Image: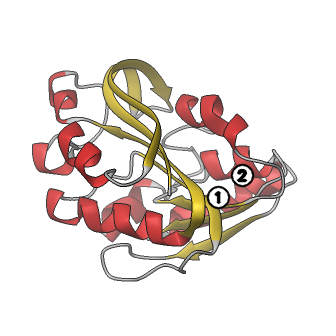
Amino acid sequence: MANIWNERFHSEEYYYGEEPNVFIQQQAYRIEQGQKVIAFAEGEGRNAVFLAKRNLEVTAIDYAESGLQKTKILAQKHSVDVLTQKIDLLEEDVPSEEYDVAIMVYGHFHKDAQISVLNKMKKAIKPKGILMLEVFSKEQVKYGTGGPPELEMLYDPKDILAWCEGHEVIHFFYGEQERVAGKAHNGLAHVIQLVLRK
């Protein structure tokens, strides 16, 4: 799988564009200046760079080296610093309670691994830290506007809500959103959004 993403990001063009995800733009006001953010499955760095421009200390993690290289190039273009780390979330662990915020945009994993990745996001943030997530729901297969074509790689809102038990859910959305992200995500999509406080 890593090779697919490495190849996909291995061009000068930004596969998902250079503009940050709309949901992250809308929710960024919740993050205080100077806070530490970790961006999971961050790809080519569009969200990490956007947050770094807001005076945040951002670490972008991904398992595609080519994506991390493009993150550095994009950060330089915008005169900001983004720390990058090559991490395979299916195999490797993340630091414990080191960050104030964890984000993930379209980090799609097989159903068997989804909760494990969410647990790593939760582990990475401090008590009272915030977790932000936008992923495609299982309904997305009918839309054909981006995301994995396999149902097993998409998310079920019931699974995510069950996982949230015991934490404060600040924002939850399940439904249609217009999304334009490079050449990969275009048009009406079916998403799940979550903002949770640990």
Figure quadrant of residue 25: top right
Mark 2, secondary structure of its residue: helix
On screen, residue 98 above or below 41: below
- The x and y percentages for residue 99 are 64, 67
Coloring basis for residues: secondary structure
Left or right side of 35 for 27: left
Residue 74: give its label.
2
On screen, residue 20 above or below 69: above
CB contact under 8 Å: marks 1 and 2: yes
Please state which amino acid type lies under the numbered disc 1: Thr
Q: Residue at x 45, y 59 (%)?
A: 41
Q: Is residue 19 visible?
A: no
Q: Residue at x 17, y 28 (%)?
A: 139
**In front here: 176 or 64?**
176
Q: Which residue is label 1 attached to?
A: 71
- The x and y percentages for residue 105 are 46, 45
